[in-house]
Structures are given as structure tokens and as C-alpha cells.
Amino acid sequence: DSICEGEEYDFYGTKLNKSGTYTNYVSESDRCIYVTLNLTVNPSYSIDKHETILEGEEYDFCGTKLTKSGSYTKVLQTTTGCDSIIHLELIVGESRIISVKSNVDTLGSVSGGGKFGIGESIILSATPESYATFVSWNDGNTENPRTILVEENVMYIAQFSLSTYAVNVSCDESKGEVSGGGEYQYGTVTVLTATPKNGYDFQKWSDGVTDNIRSYSVTN
């Protein structure tokens, strides 16, 4: 036989509450009967849970949707038929919205925004495209990634700009001169010019291009 933890088994007047093998002699009419009992005490469980959600969210408590702070109890049964009691302390905390975006979507993306509890520490990250550079956040902070403490609803905008590259042009100045070099943003088209001095001819640029006046798209 079996009982649940916390219950008692009446074995011919003896109250039993522990698993084990028990014996007793029972008189019936003109004879005595030797009785053996194999008793199993199945466990009952009591579980304490402490959970926190944010306002506007729901907590699924064994099929019941909870949205308010409070103490809740559920009594369930184990496979052996014994009670399992779950005590839940639920806290519904205030939330704030942290919004994030890029100043130009094609230059980079931002992550880390969402709904969070007041006092929560979160990390925001700005990821520039290969041809762009992260400059700063709209509040002037230049850390990337950066950690913020949630206190109020805030919008953080990552400021990206096109990367700048150096275009270097040079030649033997005794034979001619070149122009068009300098610092340019990604995608800029600059004109490179090679002008030979008297008695010299232009041959080609270092990348094999033979036009002495050429357009060059800055990509690296």
C-alpha cells in the first residue's frame, strides 16, 4: 500500500507514516493470522517561487495568466496522486522603453533597445557597415558598445558617417606632376591627373591604367 507524505496509515490500530515493511498478528475466530504490510510513503512537494515581470506582460502560472503583483498558490497532483503545492510571489515592476535607431539606416544598425525594468542595466551597440564609421550617440557619448541604467523612456540615435580614405598620388617630380590626391569619403569620385614635363611622356598609373586624366571612385 502507499500513502502521501504527511498522511498516516492505520495498521490495525498502529499509525504509520514511514515507508517500510510491518507485521502484525490478527486474531480471527479460532486462529491467528500473520499479516505483512509493505508501505510506501510517496513524497509531497512544496515549491516556493519568486518571479518578476514588467507591466503589460503576463505570467503563465500553470495555465493561469497573471498580470498583478501578489501571492498565488496552486495545488497539483504528482503521478502518485500526492499533492504538490506551488507558492508564487509575483512582482509586476514598472517598465520603461529604450528606443534605438541609426541616423542613416544604410550606414549602420543599432541593437539593445526594448522594454526594461527601472534600474536595469543594459548594453547598446552600434554596428557600422564596412564603408561607414560610428561617430557618437545623439547625447554626445562616444562609447560603443555602451552601458546605460534604465530610468526613463529615452531614444538613443547612433550617428554614423561615411568612412574617409586617403588617395595618395605621386611621381618623379623631375619628370612631371600629379594632382587629385587627398582625403575623400567613401563613394566619392575624384579626378586624377598626370602632367608630364617637356621631353617626357606619361606611361601609366601604378594600377595599370593608361589614361593620364582618369576618374577614380574611392572605396578603400
Image (cartoon, rainbow, N blue to C red):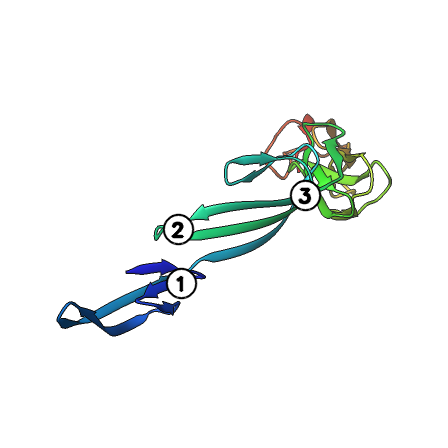
> Amino acid type of disc 1?
Glu
Q: Residues within 10 Å of mark 2 (few under 14, many from 20)?
A: few
64 or 219, which lies in front? 64
Q: Which residue is mark 2?
A: 78
Residue 208 figure quarter: top right
Secondary element at image label 3: strand
Judge left or right: residue 84 versus residue 134: left
**Depth-wise, is mark 1 or mark 2 nearer the camera?**
1
Dot 3 or dot 1: first in sequence order is 1
x and y, in percent, of residue 12 in the image: 30, 67
Residue 178 makes an appearance in the image: no
User: What's the mark number on residue 8?
Assistant: 1
Question: Quarter holding the C terminus?
Answer: top right
x and y, in percent, of residue 102 in the image: 73, 31
Residue 177 figure quarter: top right
Secondary element at image label 2: loop
Q: Which residue is mark 3?
A: 70
> Amino acid type of disc 2?
Thr
Query: Would you place residue 109 above or below residue 21 in this image?
Result: above
179 or 35, which lies in front? 35
Question: Quarter holding the N terminus?
Answer: bottom left
x and y, in percent, of residue 115 in the image: 70, 36
The residue shown at (47%, 52%) is 84
